[in-house]
Amino acid sequence: MNKQECLQIVELLSVTWDKPLDTQTLTIRTKGYWEYIQDLPYEQTKQTIKKLGLTHKYAPKPGELRIATLAAQHNETPPPDPEEAWATLQHISQQIYNGTSNYTKPHPALAATIRKLGGQATTLHTNSDRQMFINIYQKTIEEHIHTKYGMNNDNTT
């Protein structure tokens, strides 16, 4: 993507989420987004904004746009939020305790968290367990995002 395309992305984003379109604001916003999306393909980024515009109440921050674009480009889903990950872990635990193993494979970030927790992962159920899980999961998400979607990685092509 070149700087003119980045400006067009910011204009589309601004119109989609009813942000100011004056020249000064667009220039500042474009500089901020440029730092995060300059190595992304223009068309894929544009499609990501259109998709997010249908479901998101607020405009994505530059890093969120980067993650969503790269995830879409590689046909991946971003990591679930911590509460959704906790619910998925609880579902997996119930399946295991019911003697079945036909649960849906968890997102790689959740699977990494389960590996970090070891054998105790499926025994977590209290509020303090949930908080411990969320703390570990959030650190795992950060590692996952930096590795998968961070700047200067090989995942942009």
Image (cartoon, grey):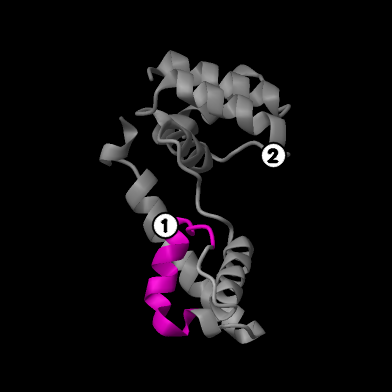
Q: Quadrant of the C terminus?
A: top left
- Specify the principal SS of the magenta part: helix
Q: Amino acid at mark 1?
A: Pro
> In the current view of this chain or complex, which residue is farthest to the top?
4
Secondary structure state at the residue bearing disc 1 = helix
Q: How many marks?
A: 2
Q: Which residues are magenta?
A: 103-121
Residue positioned 52% across, 63% down in the render: 102
Question: In the rendering, at what x and y percent does residue 150 appear?
Answer: 36, 45
Can you identify the residue that label 1 sits on? 108
Q: Residue 54: say if magenta.
A: no
State the residue in front, 93 or 2.
93
Q: Secondary structure at mark 2?
A: loop
Residue at image position (53%, 16%) is 8
Q: x, y (%) of residue 42?
A: 44, 20
Q: CA distance from mark 2 to mark 1?
A: 27 Å
**Dividing the image into 4 quarters, which one contains the N terminus?**
top left
Camera sees residue 53: yes
Q: Which residue is mark 2?
A: 58
Nearer the observer, 39 or 82: 82
Q: Amino acid at mark 2?
A: Tyr
